[in-house]
Image (cartoon, rainbow, N blue to C red):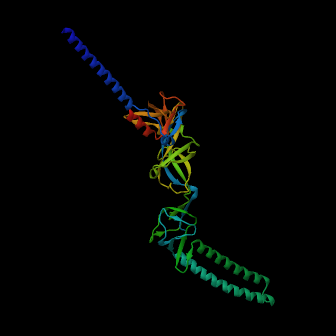
Amino acid sequence: MYTTNLYRLMLVVFAILLGASCAKNKNEHIIQEESPTFCLNDFMKDDIVKVAIEKKAITESILLNAKVEANPDKLVHFVSLVSGVVTKTYFSSGEKVKKGQLLLEMMSSELSNLNSEKSSLQSQILVAQRELESVQEMHRDKIASQRDLIAAQSHLDVLRAELQNTNAQLNLYSASSERGVFQVRASSSGTIISKNVAAGMQVSAEGDPLFTISDLDEVWIMANIYVGNVPYVKQGMPVEIKALPYANEVFFGEINAVSQVFDSDERVLKARIVMDNIDGKLMPGMLVDVTVEKEDGLMANAAPVEALVFDDNQHFLVLYKSDCDIEVRKVTPNIQNANTVYFENNIEAGEQIIIKNHLLIYNHLKALK
């Protein structure tokens, strides 16, 4: 009886052990199925960009506040040469104008004086022509002397010169005798960057400019260099320029000159950047940010800043070894500027990293863990 019970007990223990072994093998099979290898498919391979980690000189970004200004060599200030009252304006600030375009009309007593002077000279010339003809006949008849003939001719020439001068003044002021106004026309093509005149306004001869025209195909960007950055900002350095209205666009230029005298009001040196502006995006008065790269003289492994993946308060890079061997590596940036991030360790020069669609791959790999 005792032997029979012992035999039954051994059978139960064996059955339990066999069941545990099968369960273990089943669980292992399940884990293997839940941990598949991630490989890039053909679509993803065509849509990624890889670059190699490079050892580069460390540069730090210096941000300079700046302002767009018109090129002073291409400014035209209009100052009235006569006193009068503005009757009408035909332009607004910021408007583009063409050479010869009518900008404003102005009434002035000087126009009446010039028209009266012109009429008087025309009458005097008619009289002087008749006198000259008479002296010429008398000279042929030996009644008038050569001296009388020369005097008559000279008098007529003087009157004609005075009339020519009066007409020149009327043309200079673009006088319209029919309307009784001076017409001011644009002396060059460009953009009205300031307007200080309105209809009904009294203006004086050689007073303040009534308006200013500038050719904005080329503009100056004047950047402020504070004392601490003076040693690092030099003529000829490349710069990147960003303007708030064009947040996703970067303008590239070069420092053309650095002033050697501090601005007494702002207590800064001024850096001048001459920019082509054919598309007219940069307008006088616009505030912009200018970025200059300062070299520290040190070297470090570097990657494009867009390669970084920031997740859970940590930084990662997606490394490519093969289509089925992609690694997510935690890194610690040492220095970062606008375009490049530098690492002190945990990444080696020559290692391949993915910089386009790497976030998608990162999320795939994270989901498989």
Vertical comparison of 152 with 344: above or below: below
Question: Picture coordinates of residue 117 (x, y %)?
Answer: 59, 79
Q: Residue at x 52, y 57 (%)?
A: 280
Q: Quick one: 153 or 229, which is closer to the camera?
A: 229
Determine the image quadrant of residue 138: bottom right
Q: Residue at x 35, y 24 (%)?
A: 25
Q: Residue furthest left?
A: 1
Question: Picture coordinates of residue 41 (x, y %)?
Answer: 48, 39
Answer whether residue 29 is visible to the viewer in this image.
Answer: yes
Q: Is 155 displayed left or right of 176 in the figure?
A: right
Answer whether residue 228 is visible to the viewer in this image.
Answer: no
Quadrant of the rendering where the C terminus is positioned? top left
Q: Residue at x 52, y 38 (%)?
A: 50
Question: Picture coordinates of residue 232 (x, y %)?
Answer: 53, 37
Vertical comparison of 166 with 240: above or below: below
Q: Residue furthest top?
A: 2
Quadrant of the rendering where the N terminus is positioned? top left
Q: Quick one: 4 or 23, which is closer to the camera?
A: 4
Q: Residue at x 25, y 14 (%)?
A: 10
Vertical comparison of 209 with 262: above or below: below
Q: Is 347 displayed left or right of 256 in the figure?
A: left
Q: Quick one: 250 or 174, which is closer to the camera?
A: 250
Determine the image quadrant of residue 261: top right
Vertical comparison of 273 with 178: above or below: above
